[in-house]
Amino acid sequence: MEILQKVQEQILSYVKEIADDKSLELLGLLPNGKMLRSKLILKIAGANEESIKLCAVVEMIHAASLLHDDVIDDATTRRGKQTINALFDNKTSIMFGDILYSKAFTELTKMDKEVAYTISNAVTLLSVGELLDVELSKIFNTSYDKYLDMIYKKTASLIEASAKSAAILANKNRDNFALYGKNLGLAFQMVDDILDITEDSEKLGKPAMLDFVEGKVTIPYLFTYERSNEQDKTKLENFYKKELSNDETLWLKNQFSTTNAIQDSIALAQKFGSNAIEAIKDENNEDLVLIMKAMIERDF
Ligand code: FPP
Ligand code: MG
């Protein structure tokens, strides 16, 4: 999308305004993402100066959150590129995250008050969600409700806020678009959690099957655990946070298969996807249906 280039240019011009060479260098080292949030904003609000600025602000916040997340997760690769914490150190990643985040907030203060409130409130949720993720990764979590609450806050909240803010700018029904964004965001994180298991590291641009090693009991693990007998439950508990041997990985994959955990996780993501489409059925926006479908069917 040609227009996404304009968003990139807006981000570059914001970072140039900071007048710091190191920040410009670091910006150039960030991997290009899918820009899902921008795609939604542009499809809802259309492409104009105001919506492009909102996209840039949201992408900067998202990038900041990933710079912090890569430190928290000790990640060395993202989207096939070395992370800033791997190329430099944790301090650089955290501080560049803070720079992007605060510049985004400066720009947000110049925008519509309700948009500014919606986006800034989502960042609080985002941070609470990341903290919940950290807490839930300490001991084997078997609660679906806790998982859902965490992924809503960690991932869906900013997508929900992006769609809602775009609707505010375009004078459209903000509740419908917010609900679309929320459900799309939940489905998005579930697909992410499924791909961690089903795809190889080359496709993912980061190590595969890392979630469970990191202590994250994602939706496929929740399903497989819930449906396992006592003996297999114990085995799963023993595999938790462990680097697995090839045989152990094979056993785990077989366990996913016999418990239908992957298929049912996909079905659940699809259900949230359908909820997203249902929320905007009166809005006449076929492109948003296509974005949702492409998001579910993606393989990285
Ligand atoms: C990736 O999750 C992380 C997020 C979606 C949110 C991270 C949020 C914060 C660090 C708090 C907000 C901070 C600022 C500065 C705005 P993941 O680890 O499950 O996914 P991954 O595999 O892509 O790393
Ligand atoms: Mg991470």
Image (spheres, rainbow, N blue to C red):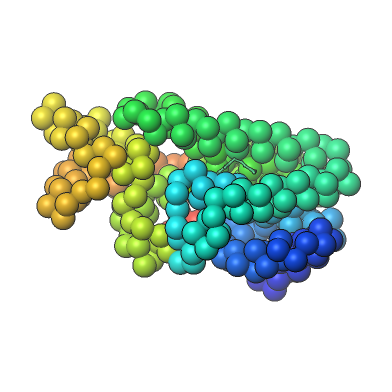
Q: Nearer the viewer, residue 31 or 33?
A: 31
Is the C terminus in the top left, top right, bottom left or bottom right quadrant? Answer: bottom left
Can residue 114 be seen in this snapshot?
Answer: yes
Q: Please tell me whether residue 66 is drawn above or below residue 35 in the rendered image.
A: above
Is the N terminus in the top left, top right, bottom left or bottom right quadrant? Answer: bottom right
Instruction: Give x and y (percent) for residue 30.
Output: 60, 64
Can residue 178 be seen in this snapshot?
Answer: no
Ligand 1, seen in the image, is in the quarter at top right
- In the image, farthest residue toward the bottom: 2
Q: Nearer the viewer, residue 86 or 284?
A: 86
Instruction: Give x and y (percent) for residue 60.
Output: 69, 54
Q: Nearer the viewer, residue 200 or 175?
A: 200
Q: Measuring 61% from the left and 54% from the top, which residue is drawn there?
A: 92
Q: Please tell me whether residue 268 is drawn above or below residue 131 in the rendered image.
A: below
Q: How many marks?
A: 0
Q: Please tell me whether residue 1 is drawn above or below residue 161 in the rendered image.
A: below
Q: Please tell me whether residue 139 is drawn above or below residue 204 in the rendered image.
A: above
Q: Measuring 51% from the left and 48% from the top, which residue is drawn there?
A: 71
Quarter of the image for residue 124 reads top right
Instruction: Give x and y (percent) for residue 49.
Output: 85, 61
Instruction: Give x and y (percent) for residue 63.
Output: 62, 54
> Does 268 sit left or right of 176 as displayed?
left
- In the image, farthest residue toward the right: 110
Q: Measuring 49% from the left and 59% from the top, which residue is drawn there?
A: 86
Q: Measuring 16% from the left and 30% from the top, which residue is drawn there?
A: 234
